[in-house]
Structures are given as structure tokens and as C-alpha cells.
Image (tube, helix red, strand yellow):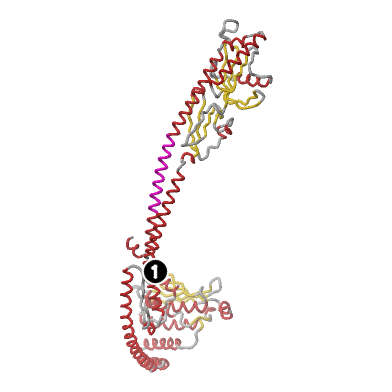
């Protein structure tokens, strides 16, 4: 890793250093922010739990106070006598006295809105003249209570009371007679207290958190809340998204107290902390970036000037270098020292350059003389026709002397040589095969018939035009690199056919040693590249001048990229070389396109 880091540029290294430092600072600040948020959250959570307990106790005390007020009121002597009084005059007088008594009781609890009495014998109080009002209270009486003869909180009720409709929490207590007489021990009526839904929950004033509190009855209906819009709704209809919800039972009354604190309130103050953290990180990043710019200007700018100076030198010729100004670099002291040493080096280089130019001039003159001598030597080489005539002479002498192998080999070689120097570039397939057969006859003499040759050429393809000398190099490679390496007798197949598209395919196949997988892969790559020098050097040595790649290139240049040579080989089994040539109509299209 360190070695790879050293290979990067100075600017890249500085940028990486800045980025790593920035990431480290951001992670540190993020961790600090997370720790502080967790601490604040834990403290707020503890405070909310305490607040929830206190609120629930206050509500419970409030209900207990209502319970006591109802019990004392129900068994008040005036109330008892009023419910049992049959005389209208006396009942009216008792009503007036009872009004005064009940009005004095109301201030004892701020949740109490009013009292209602429903008498068993029709002695009602505070019901008004609307029959529906008494019917509503009678419906409450008819509900089955799990606390008979005790104060029962009947949840929230929407009642028409004193000429207006409103939601009230209703507390109800059956009244039994305690005075001696006909009503003793019997149920003589019901006392109702109407409670204000908004005052059941105490006023909560806190600078730390603000939230909503809901009192739910046994049906999960909100009977009281500091959120007036939630009163009377089912709890499931209250939106509590992005909030912390906690529940506390009020077991004596069957109610539940639910607190809903928005996350924004729970983490209040974190926004300012987050802003301060972001500002600090931003300042640190700006300072580091300023440091990066300062270092970069003192290092990178001189380096850029140096590179520009060097490129300027490269673009000028040697005569101008004599008048080249010295390199001037501004930056750290080491940069100035580098410029001084470089100027000294350039002065020495200019002197050496002049010396080298003079030396090269003399060498160039000698090279010209050498080339002229080589050209004269080449011009004096033996004429190809003289070689052909010499081969014919050797053939005649071998015939006279009765050395038939030499005669046949010389005759075959003479035909090949004459064929190769002919001016035509395109010949018939039969003529190309004739030269291949001459070449094979020479190799059969050399290898003492160590292989057999099999031909499968349809007669209609013998006149098919092909490029000259495209088969002999492939046959040569099959013999020397396939069959010759084999310890047993081999076989060579030369076949031709038309494929379904009308193109002609010539297959040269041997059962020699084949080609290793990695060498075959390299061979195919070089065929694609078309490097004749590399391919011929790999297969037959540097003396071979016409190779498979040469044939492949000639075919592709002549006919198109889709034509040429394809090689398939399996090690220890043999090699197949397929030449694909276009039908005559395709050639005509390329000629006239």
C-alpha cells in the first residue's frame, strides 16, 4: 500500500490526506453529537416518565376528590329528603336550599361543571324542560355498571344540557335512602356530576418538553386532553407519527393516561448543537483546504513550470537551445535548489549535444557510404532467371546420371521457383494445388514417405480463382510443426468445398502433435493483430519470409475482414487450418464498390 501511495502525484497525496483528515474530523464530530443526543434523550426520557407519573397521580387525586364529593352529596340530608318528598311546596323549598348547598360544593373541584339528580319518583334536579335531557341520563343509568352502589365514571358523553350540546365526562352514583321511612335502604335516585373534559388533565408548564396528554376510557375513547381537537375521538384516530408514546394505567377508574411527545420536542436543542458542529467542521475543512492550496502552490506550481519548461525544450531544435533562458522557480528553498542544479545540468547537456551532433554527422556520412556499397552488392546478385536455368541444368545432369531423386526434387523446385516469380497475383485453384504437390513431393523424398497425403477437391472448384502462394506456407507449417514432430507415420489432408453461403472453404489438416493451448491462444491473437514478423518467428524462425499471418493479411485486405484463416488445434491430436474465400459475386461487388 505504501509503495502504491508513493507512486501517486503530490497533489493526489495531499488531496487524500485532506480527505482522510476531513473524514476523521467528521466522524469525531458525529460521534460527539451522537453521544450528546443520547445523553439529552436519556435525561428527557427520565423527566417524561416522572412527569407522566405525576400527571397520572394528579388525575387520580382529582377523580378521588370527585368520588368523595359525590358520596357526601348523595347522602346529604337535603338531597335525601328532596328525593323522597311528595309535597310540591315542600319539594320546592328543599330545591332552593339544595341549590345553595350544591353551588357551594362546585368550587371544591375545578373540573365540576354541574350536578344532576334523577329521582326514582320523578324528583329531578337540574334536568330542565327538554325531555331528551332526562332520557339521555336515563340511558346512562340503564348501562350495566361493574361497580354497583359506587361512583362510576361513564366516560365521555355528548349531552344537551342547559340549552347547549357539549362533551362531558359523566360520573354517576346510585343513591339509596338512609332516613327512616319508606325509602330506607332502597334506590331512590341517581346523582350525576358533569366534568369539564379539558380540566381533568392538570395544566402542565415545562420549559423542557411540550407534548399532548390523553385520558382514555375503557373503550379507548379520549375523554380528556390538553389537545381539544382530540377529545371524543378514538385513540386509533389520533396521529402520533414521529413521536414517543408512553402509557400509564389509572387502575381504580379503568382509565389510561397516554403521553405523546414529538421527537422534535424530545431532542429540542439538538438543532443548535448540530448547527454549531457543522460550522466547526466547515471551518476546519476551510482551514485544511487553505493549507492544501498553500502547499500546492509552493510545490505544484513550480513543478508545472518545470514541466512546461521541459516541454518547451523538447519542442525546440538544438540551435535554439543555445539561447534558452535559465529555469526560474519560486517556492520552497528545495525548489530553488532544484532549479539551480537543473540549469547547471542543461548547460552541460548543451555542450554535450553539440559534440554529439558533430559525431552523428560523421556517422551519418559513413552510413550513406555503407548503404551505397550494399546497394551495389545487391545489384550484382544472381539474376532469378539464371537460377531457374541452373536448376534446369542440374535436372538434366541428374537424368543423365540416373539419379532420379535429384531429378524429381530439382524439377519440382524449378517449378516452384518459376511459379513464385511469375507476375500474376491470381491463379486457379488447380494451379495452386499443382505447386503444393511439387512442394510435397520434395518433402516426401526428404522424410522418406513418413506421411500420406489425401486430396478431396471437387472438380468444379479446380477453376476457382485464388491468390498465389496461399496454400504452400500452410502445408509447410503442417509438415514441419505437426507431422515432423510425430514419432509415427502421419497424414495430411487437403480438402475444398462450398459452404451454405456459397463461399469456398479450403481445409488443410494434419494428425501431428498439435499446438499447446497457450501457444494456440497466442497464435490466434497474433493472427488477429496480423503481425507477420512475430508469427513467422514463432513458427518457422526468422528466415521464413511468407507465413500464415502474411496469407491471412493478404486475404483480409483483398476480400474483407470476414474472410481469411481460422485455426483449430488439439494437442497430441492434430491441427486444422481453414481458409475462407468469397464467392465470385462478392469479389465483383468489392471491385466495383
- Residue 444 seen in the current view: no
Whether residue 263 sits left or right of residue 540 in the image: it is right
Percent across and percent down for residue 201 are 52, 28
**Does residue 80 lie above or below 319 as drawn?**
above
Whether residue 339 sits left or right of residue 492 in the image: it is left
Q: Main secondary structure of the magenta part?
A: helix
- Residue nearer the viewer, 504 or 339: 339
**Does residue 344 lie above or below 110 as drawn?**
below
Residue 29 is a magenta residue: yes
Q: Quadrant of the C terminus?
A: bottom right
Is label 1 in a helix, a strand or a loop?
A: helix
Q: Quadrant of the N terminus?
A: bottom left
Q: Which residues are magenta?
A: 23-46
Q: Which residue is mark 1?
A: 301
- Residue nearer the viewer, 210 or 589: 210
Give the image quarter of residue 365. Answer: bottom left
Percent across and percent down for residue 223 are 56, 28
- Residue nearer the viewer, 578 or 147: 147
Residue 439 is a magenta residue: no
The residue shown at (49%, 77%) is 556
Amino acid at each position: 500500500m505504501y509503495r502504491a501511495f508513493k507512486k501517486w502525484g503530490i497533489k493526489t497525496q495531499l488531496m487524500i490526506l485532506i480527505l482522510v483528515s476531513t473524514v476523521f474530523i467528521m466522524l469525531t464530530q458525529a460521534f460527539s453529537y451522537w453521544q450528546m443526543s443520547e445523553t439529552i434523550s436519556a435525561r428527557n426520557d427520565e423527566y417524561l416518565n416522572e412527569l407522566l407519573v405525576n400527571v397520572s397521580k394528579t388525575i387520580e387525586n382529582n377523580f378521588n376528590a370527585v368520588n368523595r364529593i359525590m358520596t357526601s352529596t348523595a347522602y346529604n340530608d337535603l338531597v335525601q329528603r328532596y328525593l323522597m318528598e311528595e309535597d310540591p311546596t315542600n319539594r320546592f323549598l328543599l330545591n332552593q336550599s339544595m341549590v345553595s348547598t350544591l353551588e357551594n360544593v362546585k368550587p371544591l373541584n375545578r373540573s365540576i361543571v354541574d350536578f344532576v339528580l334523577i329521582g326514582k319518583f320523578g324528583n329531578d334536579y337540574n334536568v330542565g324542560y327538554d325531555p331528551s335531557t332526562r332520557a339521555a341520563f336515563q340511558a346512562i343509568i340503564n348501562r350495566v355498571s361493574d361497580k354497583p352502589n359506587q361512583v362510576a365514571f361513564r366516560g365521555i358523553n355528548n349531552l344537551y344540557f342547559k340549552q347547549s350540546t357539549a362533551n362531558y365526562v359523566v360520573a354517576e352514583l346510585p343513591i339509596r335512602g338512609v332516613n327512616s321511612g319508606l325509602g330506607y335502604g332502597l334506590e331512590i335516585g341517581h346523582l350525576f356530576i358533569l366534568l369539564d373534559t379539558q380540566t381533568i388533565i392538570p395544566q402542565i408548564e415545562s420549559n423542557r418538553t411540550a407534548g399532548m396528554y390523553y385520558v382514555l376510557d375503557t373503550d379507548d375513547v379520549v375523554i380528556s386532553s390538553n389537545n381539544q381537537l382530540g377529545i371524543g375521538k378514538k385513540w386509533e384516530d389520533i396521529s402520533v407519527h414521529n413521536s414517543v408514546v408512553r402509557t400509564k394505567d389509572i387502575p381504580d377508574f379503568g382509565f389510561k393516561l397516554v403521553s405523546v411527545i414529538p421527537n422534535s420536542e424530545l431532542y429540542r436543542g439538538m438543532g443548535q448543537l448540530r448547527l454549531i458542529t457543522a460550522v466547526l467542521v466547515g471551518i476546519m475543512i476551510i482551514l485544511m483546504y487553505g493549507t492544501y492550496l498553500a502547499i500546492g502552490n509552493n510545490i505544484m506550481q513550480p513543478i508545472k513550470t518545470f514541466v512546461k519548461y521541459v516541454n518547451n525544450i523538447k519542442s525546440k531544435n538544438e540551435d535554439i537551445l543555445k539561447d534558452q533562458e535559465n529555469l526560474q522557480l519560486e517556492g520552497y528553498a528545495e525548489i530553488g535548489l532544484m532549479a539551480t542544479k537543473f540549469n547547471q545540468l542543461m548547460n552541460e547537456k548543451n555542450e554535450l549535444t553539440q559534440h554529439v551532433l558533430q559525431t552523428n554527422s560523421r556517422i551519418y556520412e559513413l552510413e550513406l557510404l555503407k548503404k551505397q556499397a550494399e546497394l551495389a552488392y545487391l545489384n550484382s546478385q544472381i539474376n532469378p532467371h539464371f537460377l531457374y536455368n541452373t536448376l534446369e541444368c542440374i535436372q538434366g545432369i541428374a537424368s543423365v546420371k540416373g539419379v532420379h531423386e535429384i531429378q524429381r526434387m530439382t524439377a519440382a523446385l524449378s517449378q516452384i521457383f518459376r511459379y513464385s516469380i511469375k507476375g500474376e497475383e491470381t491463379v486457379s485453384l488447380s494451379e495452386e494445388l499443382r505447386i503444393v504437390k511439387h512442394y510435397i513431393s520434395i518433402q516426401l523424398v526428404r522424410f522418406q514417405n513418413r506421411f500420406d497425403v489425401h486430396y478431396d477437391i471437387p472438380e468444379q472448384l479446380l477453376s476457382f480463382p485464388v491468390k498465389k502462394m496461399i496454400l504452400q506456407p500452410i502445408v509447410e507449417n503442417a509438415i514441419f510443426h505437426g507431422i515432423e514432430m510425430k514419432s509415427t507415420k502421419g497424414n495430411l489432408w487437403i480438402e475444398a468445398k462450398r459452404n451454405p453461403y456459397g463461399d469456398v472453404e479450403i481445409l488443410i489438416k494434419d494428425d501431428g502433435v498439435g499446438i499447446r493451448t497457450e501457444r494456440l491462444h497466442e497464435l490466434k491473437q497474433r493472427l488477429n493483430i496480423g503481425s507477420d514478423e512475430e508469427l513467422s518467428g514463432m513458427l518457422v524462425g526468422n528466415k521464413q519470409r511468407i507465413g500464415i499471418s502474411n496469407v491471412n493479411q493478404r486475404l483480409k485486405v483483398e476480400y474483407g475482414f470476414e474472410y481469411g484463416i481460422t485455426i483449430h488445434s488439439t494437442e497430441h491430436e492434430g491441427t486444422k487450418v481453414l481458409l475462407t474465400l468469397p464467392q465470385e459475386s462478392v469479389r465483383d461487388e468489392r471491385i466495383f464498390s
